[in-house]
Amino acid sequence: MRFGSDFEEGMKSVAPHELAPLQRAMAAYFFNFVPRESNLYVKLARRIARSSGWSGAACTLNYERLLELSLLSAGVQPLIGKAPPEGSVFELCLPHGCCHLFCEGVRGTAGSVSFHGYNVNTDGPISVIGDRQQHRTRIIEDAFPPVMSYFEPAKRTTAGNSFIEGQRTRWRELAENAKTIVIVGVRVHPKDDHVWTPIACSNTRVVYCGGPTGATEYDAWSRSSRQDWDTDLVLNGYFQDGFEVICSEAGL
């Protein structure tokens, strides 16, 4: 019941030493997600591929690889971890990490190493593992989870903590300098200040699409938190309903 009503709050009931094994299991689950041809991410990626001279970046809070795989399927090479040289590749920002990113600073054998998930942080080079068998081997054999924030209220991170902090800093920069911010499928959680404070502080027009309930919540939050709330466009439907409007607003 705890997880059903609020998964993040339910995570508080998980014993700290069980967090890393659970995180590895979640990463294995999310790694299996592959976009279909009909996926809206694929359609969006194709729009990006066709838009010569379009400059933009994507930021996702999800742990799966759907957006990255969609971009690759359309011939768009995403760069993760830093701002790309102008006009070269597409920037993908991951403030919560992703299921296929691994920190190479520390390794430990699963079953032989146990640690308090919230009190241990590792740093070092980040590797991207896209091969299914290599990913499975790493999940099974390495005690340390992929570079993913725990799905709990504080969004704390064990592996690659500096990478995550760097991505959150990069998100603030992107929000500050964007011409338009488009938010799709993200409900307002003001406690996630690393996500919402950059939006609150931005003078940029926001296009919000998160379903009828999300629209009501965003509108109330925007009016109380954003100086330029009256310039925002709040769509009442979901991604599929607002796809064409979103692409138009984003210059695609």
Image: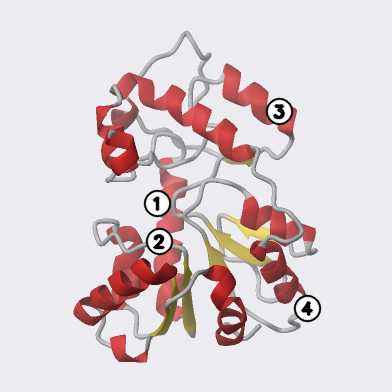
How far, Cα to Cα, is label 3 from label 4?
A: 33 Å
Q: Name the residue tied to disc 3.
A: 134
The colour scheme used here is secondary structure
Label located before the other in sequence (2 or 3):
3
Label located before the other in sequence (1 or 4):
4
Residue 56 location (% of width, % of height) = 59, 76
Label located before the other in sequence (3 or 4):
4
Residue 131 location (% of width, % of height) = 74, 35
Q: Which residue does the image show at 41% across and 58% down from the upper left? A: 168
Q: Name the residue tied to disc 1.
A: 165
- Assess disc 1: are there few (<14), some (14-19) or many (≥20) residues with their C-alpha within 10 Å of its C-alpha: some
Label located before the other in sequence (2 or 4):
4
Residue in the foreground of this view, choosing between 217 and 19: 217
Looking at the image, do the residues carrying marks 2 and 1 touch, with CB atoms under 8 Å apart? yes
Q: Name the residue tied to disc 2.
A: 169
Classify residue 192 as left or right of residue 242: left
How far, Cα to Cα, is label 1 from label 3?
A: 26 Å
